[in-house]
Image (cartoon, grey):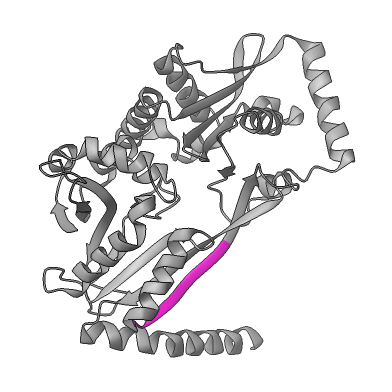
Amino acid sequence: MSVVVVRGTEALKEHIDAWQDLSDNALEPNIFYEAWMMIPAVEAFGADAELYFVFIYAPGLRRHSKKFSCGFFPLELSRRYKNLPVVVFRLWKHIHCFLCTPLLRAEKAQAALATFLDWLESDQAPAQLMEFASITADGAFHKFLIDEFNQRARLTFTSDNYNRALLNLRSNTGTSFSGRHKKELRRKQTRLSDAGTLEYIALEPEGDAEHWIKDFIQLEAEGWKGKEGTAFASETAPRKFFESAVKGAFDKDRLMMLALKFNGKPIAMKCNFISGRGSFSFKITYDETFSRYSPGVLLELENVRRVSAMPQVEWMDSCAVSEHFMINRLWADRRTIETILVSTGKRPGDFVVSVLPMLRWLRRKFLRKAQTK
């Protein structure tokens, strides 16, 4: 296998065909690292980051056949780690990226990962540390990663881990609604439908994606995110990112958009992305003047019903914070997200990773003392 490192969106675009094939055959799906999502993200949020895009290629199965991509690792280079003067690569995570598990071809995953780690340990890679941030800790990639670390006797440090809501469509748990909660939601839906025309709709393959995107951006801007300046409409770059990414997902048959309409007007909208056997709940918004009817929760129930009817989809990642009250109440399962720091074998990296556990212990000890005073 060979390593190809590129910089900038124009160089990235030269790999789109191989990249798409890799995404379609990934060990673990991650829509945030697919081309239709990554390129708009780099254009919107990558200007101030020192980004390196690492592709792992393998020779074709037949003589003279094209190489095919077996791995994709988008990296950000930083000259400091927690105020320490050490160079670190980390999997790139922009403000709207909720998972950083790299793309690895399923049948070549371990070899591609080993090739990437070999490159990290070589003089070609400038970093002394590598941070695998926000990766799944309960999937095949994590198992391969730990095996590689053990074989290489690499020092590692788990700096963060947490659980977030997962809709497991192949388990018996699924949603966790109580009978009383379901009855209350049915009552709210009935009251709303008595007041006007209520309908659940989905963006169809032949539908007008641009119209849906416009409606979503407008509805979000009218709520609390618009008031706080965090809605997509609040700044040009986030808006362009959302428009480009959603349109790209629609063109690649990766998009699932739902709406709850009252008298023909959207009062709740939801944007999901589908990739292989997985799906990702990206954004949801609702009209706050209808809050007493819980339109967001009603639409979430419709979302569960519709995604459960997709035979190829096995799970939906909430992409939510660990303490998200609404989704934790609705979805019974969890997935673990973890951040692992590893030395690349260079001396400064070994030293930093070895002292971090003690620094964490000292920090917690001093915090406990401060809290007792």
In depth, the one of 152 and 285 nearer the eye is 152
Point 26% across, 69% down: residue? 117
In depth, the one of 191 and 223 nearer the eye is 191
Pick the quarter of the image with the N terminus: bottom left
Point 70% across, 47% down: residue? 171
Q: Is residue 155 left or right of residue 330?
A: left
Q: In this view, does 94 lie to the left or right of 174?
A: left
Q: In this view, does 132 lie to the left or right of 295?
A: left
Magenta: main secondary structure: strand
Q: Determine which quarter of the picture holds residue 34.
A: top left
Q: Position of residue 264 (x, y in %)?
A: 62, 9
Question: Is 160 contained in the magenta span?
Answer: yes
In depth, the one of 164 and 214 nearer the eye is 164
Q: Give the range drawn in magenta.
A: 154-162
Q: Determine which quarter of the picture holds residue 73.
A: bottom left
Q: Where is residue 55 in the image (x, y as percent from the top left)?
A: 22, 52
Q: Position of residue 361 (x, y in %)?
A: 50, 88
Instruction: Examine the rendered structure and indicate whether residue 360 appears above or below residue 169.
Output: below
Number of on-image labels: 0
Pick the quarter of the image with the C terminus: bottom right
Point 45% across, 64% down: residue? 142
Q: Determine which quarter of the picture holds residue 52.
A: bottom left
Question: Is 276 contained in the magenta span?
Answer: no
Q: Where is residue 85 in the image (x, y as percent from the top left)?
A: 22, 79
